[in-house]
Amino acid sequence: VRLTRPAQGPVMVSLRPEQLAFGTQGTPATVLSREFGGRDTRYVLRLAGGQDVALHTLAPQTLPEGAQVFLSLRGEGHVVGQDTGRLA
C-alpha cells in the first residue's frame, strides 16, 4: 500500500471503500456479505490476516458469500495516528 506520508513501524491505514477493486491478482479475500444499494453493491470481505474491509463497486458481477477473490488498491492509504486515531 502506498502511503500519503512516510511511516515507520506498525501503523493503521485508512482506505475508502471505493479505493478497493476486484482483480485477477492482489490481496486474497473471502466474501462475507453483499448488499445491493441501487446504483452500487457493497461487499464486506475478510482478508487472510482476519481484517474485515468494505468494498463498493458499480460492477454488475454478483459474488456469493464464501467466494474467494483478489483485491487491488487504487490510490494511497492515509496513515492514522496510533495515539489519537485521527488522520495524520
Image: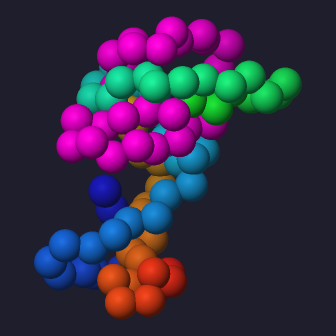
User: Would you identify the image quadrant in which residue 5 lies?
Assistant: bottom left
Q: Nearer the viewer, residue 25 or 48?
A: 48
* Observer able to see residue 24: yes
Magenta region, residue range: 44-70
In the picture provided, is 22 more to the left or to the right than 48? right
What colouring style does the render use? Answer: rainbow
**Residue 53 at what x, y percent from top left?**
45, 44
Q: Is residue 69 one of those drawn in magenta?
A: yes
Q: Height in image: 50 above or below 58?
A: below
**Residue 44 at what x, y percent from top left?**
51, 34
- Quadrant of the image for the N terminus? bottom left
Most distant residue in the right direction = 38
* Observer able to see residue 57: no
In the picture provided, is 8 more to the left or to the right than 12? left
In the image, what residue occupies the spot 17% across and 81% down?
8
Q: Nearer the viewer, residue 85 or 21?
A: 85
**Residue 55 at what x, y percent from top left?**
55, 38
In the image, what residue occupies the spot 15% across and 78% down?
9
- Quadrant of the image for the C terminus? bottom left
In the image, what residue occupies the spot 60% across and 23% down?
34
Most distant residue in the bottom direction = 83
Count of labels shown? 0
Q: Height in image: 84 above or below 62?
A: below
Q: Is residue 65 one of those drawn in magenta?
A: yes
